[in-house]
Amino acid sequence: MPARADISRRRFLRRTAGAAAGAVAFPHVVASSALGRAGTVAPSDRITMGSIGTGGRGTALLRAFLGLTDAQVVAVCDVKEAMRERARTMVDTYYERKDCAAYVDFRELCARDDIDAVVVASTDHWHVLHALHAVRAGKDVYCEKPLGLSVEQGRALRAAVWQYGAVFQFGTQERSAWSTRLACEIVRSHWIGDLRRVTVASRFSRASPNYPSEPVPASLDYDLWLGPAPWAPYSRHRVSNGHWFHISDYALGFLAGCGIHTVNMAMWGMGTDDTGPVEVEGIGEFPADGLCNCATGWDVNLTFAGGVVMNFTDGKRHPLGVLFEGTDGSVFVKEKHLGGAVSAQPESLLQRKFGPNDVRLPASANHGQNFLDCIKTRAETVAPIGMTVRSDAICQLTDIAMRLGRKLHWDPDRERFVDDPEADRMLRRSMRSPWRL
């Protein structure tokens, strides 16, 4: 990762390089008096941002970054007109200005050399391609979870982030939750003895009926919404937040969309951010018919080299959260949005004080602010790309094992299955032309 960088200097260098290549220059925000409610931070210290994807989660992230005074949102992008214009209005209203740009095509946003960082909160099947394009355009990236639709996609983004020296923050906000950090520090400090088993429970997807096709509304660029996914007839249900989450062409369902949170918490506590399991085996339940076809239930064991078993299951079989079980006790932690409660056996573990030889993990009180701070210092975020790919792979391997219905052997160093060409083919997905990694 590059040494400490000055934001203004980086912008100047980008503009100079862009002009030399004949690039189109976009105006900078240069005067504190013109900054509206962002004017409490000097222009040279503010990070200019663009947001790709302004649906429910994208709007929540947009609101969060608007509230951070060392960020300045200057552009939004969405293929749905209503969402795009709502986001533009939100930004303009907050800053008491009327100059937020709104794009249909993410490539136009990424082409702006006055944007330092991009927030990716689009549909899951677009996450990696949007992030890749931003990184290759010289941007730092905050990418909403889950990462992608295949192990190959995650590896490609990781390679690009490392190649371009980009700052990357994954949207697993649990890494900025005190409760998750406390539970993981207790486990990593061996207060529950030797770790033996970790149970990870997540919300699950739902089934749906089939729906008839409809004319594409003029307010939607449907071809760009589909992007790399296979062509399919339009229906309002296909593109609605209540359905696309559970359609395998666009997501792995809540297995990844929600499961990545608890999986990521477990990987932190296990100390396995830079590795993966060696065996994967379990069962899954899928709808027999209908538009939604992702897993509605699962119970999969992932065994790591040291013998620790991660039981990844759905919320019908186990309370939502992560249970760490060791030889001398246990710790259970809920996700932040569920209250982040931590319980332990024995209960006295929660009153114990950390000593000099105990493990203390990186602390972040605000996920977005941690991203901005790391952009300024070029330090690694609390949820960097390396651990992102490893955690996301757990969801991918779980889905593959369920669909093949047999035990799989995984090589975490090579990130390939062991002597299993059929399973290896499922580590990648084809993309509709002209899209590619």
Image: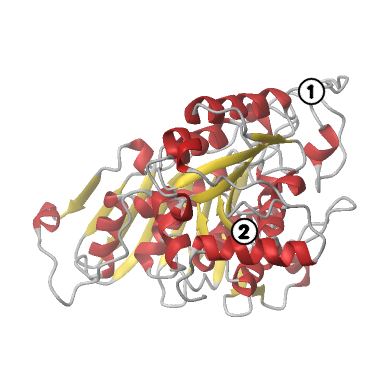
The amino acid on which the numbered mark 1 sits, given as a three-letter code, is Ser
Q: Quadrant of residue 88?
A: top right
Residue annotated with mark 2: 139
**Which one is nearer the viewer's eye here, 65 or 266?**
65
Element at badge 1? loop
Front of the two marks 2 and 1: 2
Q: Quadrant of residue 17?
A: bottom right
Position of residue 430 relative to residue 32, above or below, is below
**Which one is nearer the viewer's eye here, 269 or 154?**
154
Residue 144 visible = no
Residue annotated with mark 1: 219
**Which one is nearer the viewer's eye here, 398 or 31?**
31
- Residue 326 placed where, x, y %? 27, 65
- Residue 167 placed where, x, y %? 53, 63
Position of residue 352 relative to residue 295, above or below, is below
Residue shown at the point (37%, 44%) measured from the top left:
335
Position of residue 76 relative to residue 347, above or below, is above
- Contact? badges 2 and 1 (CB < 8 Å): no
Residue 45 visible = yes
Count of labels in the image = 2
- Residue 240 placed where, x, y %? 68, 27
Please tell me how crowded label 2 is: few (under 14), some (14-19), or many (20+) other residues with Cα within 10 Å: many
- Dot 2 or dot 1: first in sequence order is 2
Residue shown at the point (54%, 73%) measured from the top left:
278
Please tell me how crowded label 1 is: few (under 14), some (14-19), or many (20+) other residues with Cα within 10 Å: few
Residue shown at the point (36%, 48%) measured from the top left:
366
Element at badge 2? loop
Check residue 404 in the rendering and tell me which mark sits there, or answer none.
Answer: none
